[in-house]
């Protein structure tokens, strides 16, 4: 890939990093813009930030997202018709176990 390299690392596991909302006092993340030969060197060179990586990701994404589009009035189209209204019937099924 060409262009500037950037890596953001959350200090929590992959599930917790996604589900914890902004404002969690325990959340931290690191940002490193440099390519390093080892993970340890990258960790030493990366800047630590308090909060969630969402605070960094949202502006990064907004810069690349383009114009917002209006939501369609109805789901589906002539080729792909919706199966059921939201949230779908699967949410009413009992799990076995």
Image (spheres, grey):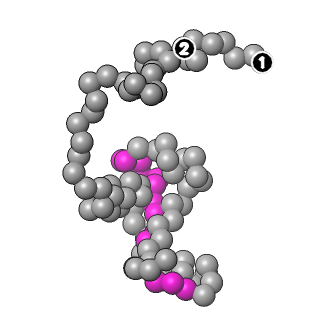
Local secondary structure at mark 1: loop
Image location of residue 65, percent across then percent down: 30, 56
Image location of residue 4, percent across then percent down: 40, 79
Q: Residues within 10 Å of mark 2 (few under 14, many from 20)?
A: few
Per the rendered image, the range of residues in magenta is 22-36
Residue 89 has which mark? 2
Local secondary structure at mark 2: helix
- Extreme-right residue of the structure: 97
* Residue 84 in magenta stretch: no
> Alpha carbon of mark 1 to alpha carbon of mark 2: how far?
20 Å
The residue at which mark 1 appears reads as 97
- Residue 17 visible: yes
- Of the 4 image quadrants, the one containing the C terminus is top right
* Residue 29 in magenta stretch: yes
Residue drawn at 63 percent across, 13 percent down: 93
Q: Quadrant of residue 39?
A: bottom right
Q: Quadrant of residue 79?
A: top left
Q: Between 4 and 26, which is closer to the camera in this rendering? A: 4
């Amino acid at each position: 890939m060409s262009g500037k390299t950037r890596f953001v690392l959350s200090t929590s596991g992959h599930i917790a990093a996604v589900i914890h909302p902004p404002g969690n006092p325990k959340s931290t993340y690191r940002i490193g813009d440099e390519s390093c030969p080892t993970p340890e060197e990258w960790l030493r060179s990366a800047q630590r930030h308090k909060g969630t990586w969402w605070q960094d990701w949202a502006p990064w994404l907004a810069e690349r997202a383009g114009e917002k589009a209006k939501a369609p009035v109805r789901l589906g189209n002539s080729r792909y018709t919706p199966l059921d209204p939201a949230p779908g019937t699967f949410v009413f099924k009992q799990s076995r176990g």
